[in-house]
Image (tube, grey):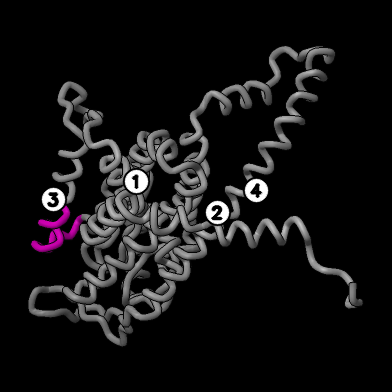
Amino acid sequence: MVLPSPRKWFLAGVSKVGPWLGRGWEDGVARLGAERLGLRPGMGSAGGQPQLRGAHCGSGPAEAAGAQFTGCAFGSAAIWQYESLKSRVQSYFDGIKADWLDSIRPQKEGDFRKEINKWWNNLSDGQRTVTGIIAANVFVFCLWRVPSLQRTMIRYFTSSPASKALCSPMLLSTFSHFSLFHMAANMYVLWSFSSSIVNILGQEQFMAVYLSAGVISNFVSYVCKVATGRYGPSLGASGAIMTVLAAVCTKIPEGRLAIIFLPMFTFTAGNALKAIIAMDTAGMILGWKFFDHAAHLGGALFGIWYITYGHELIWKNREPLVKIWHEMRTNGPKKGGGSK
């Protein structure tokens, strides 16, 4: 979501959570945002938008950081998958032993921990995977409620090409929501598509795609903001979630979707994706300001590209890295310096 102007960039969020936040909080956050972005109160362009001073908006560092992070994400995911496979083999034998012990051990009735484990085991692989993402978003949302952390949150958990912290917010802002409604809507969509996307990509590949999507969608937003001269801060998981939605709709275009408030009206996933891309393209061209349409569009295009080409180009070529990791894990560091 893109926030309209540095003075009122959180008004949309505050209007959704008005019962929890007061007017003083709203003004304080807006004032901190203006100070962080180098805005001079009372000065603006002919259109009424404040002027930025000393903004350094080069996309070079952000582009390099995005490429490096994406490579690290997919490399880490490949190693994670290798370790997971080894762990599952070991867990299989441990499970046989545990089942035998449980059969001779007296069972506890009403064990709270056992009930939690039962609930967890009833979740799909996708739901278990995104639970950690949702928990991280809730944690960051709570941090926004701490007044002493406002400067830190604005600097590192909102993304803008005019910010001094140019690269880290490309990832951190993906877990950041100021509005309760914004966070709830994003997390509901992520939860709804979690089973499908993890069935398509697997747990490890999904995490690499999701984190990379957050960085890539923010980079597209940076480019658009620099090109249009609109430097309003953005935050939210919408860009990464658009990648998830676009990937599922591209892979299963004939799947049927419905809007939560209008369940009687259904439409194909392919048509839904076309409508979303058309709306975000129009919003980016026409300068609609409530959402960060460039980030949405960047996320959607990345999701389409990854399902169509990226899986073959990136994930299926992970074997050399996995072999190197396997050799390191199997042989370990060589000891001693003597000859054989």
Q: Nearer the viewer, residue 248 or 48?
A: 248
Q: Nearer the viewer, mark 2 or mark 1?
A: 2
Q: Secondary structure at mark 4?
A: helix
In the drawing, does residue 9 fall left or right of residue 140?
A: left
The tag earlier along the polypeptide, 2 or 1, is 2
Q: Amino acid at mark 4?
A: Glu
Q: Name the residue beneath numbered marker 4.
A: 83
Quarter that holds the C terminus: bottom right
Name the residue at 16% across, 74% down.
228
Residue receiving disc 1: 244
Q: Cβ–Cβ below 8 Å for labels 2 and 1?
A: no
Circle nearer the viewer, 4 or 3: 4
Q: For residue 4, what is the image quadrant?
A: bottom left
Q: CA distance from mark 2 to mark 1?
A: 19 Å
Element at label 1 = helix
Instruction: From the top left corner, tell me how far across and down residue 103 is, in percent.
Output: 79, 13
- Mark 2 is surrounded, within 10 Å at the Cα level, by few (under 14), some (14 to 19) or many (20 or more) other residues, namely many
Asked if the magenta segment contains residue 280, the reply would be yes
Decide whether residue 322 is among the magenta residues: no
- Residue at 43% of width from left, 58% of height from top? 314
User: Element under label 2?
Assistant: helix
The answer to whether residue 2 shows anywhere in this view is no
Amino acid on which the number 2 mark rests in the picture: Ala
Q: Earlier in the sequence, mark 2 or mark 4?
A: 2
Residue drawn at (32%, 74%) of the image: 161
Q: Which residue is mark 3?
A: 279
Q: Position of residue 302 (x, y in %)?
A: 30, 56
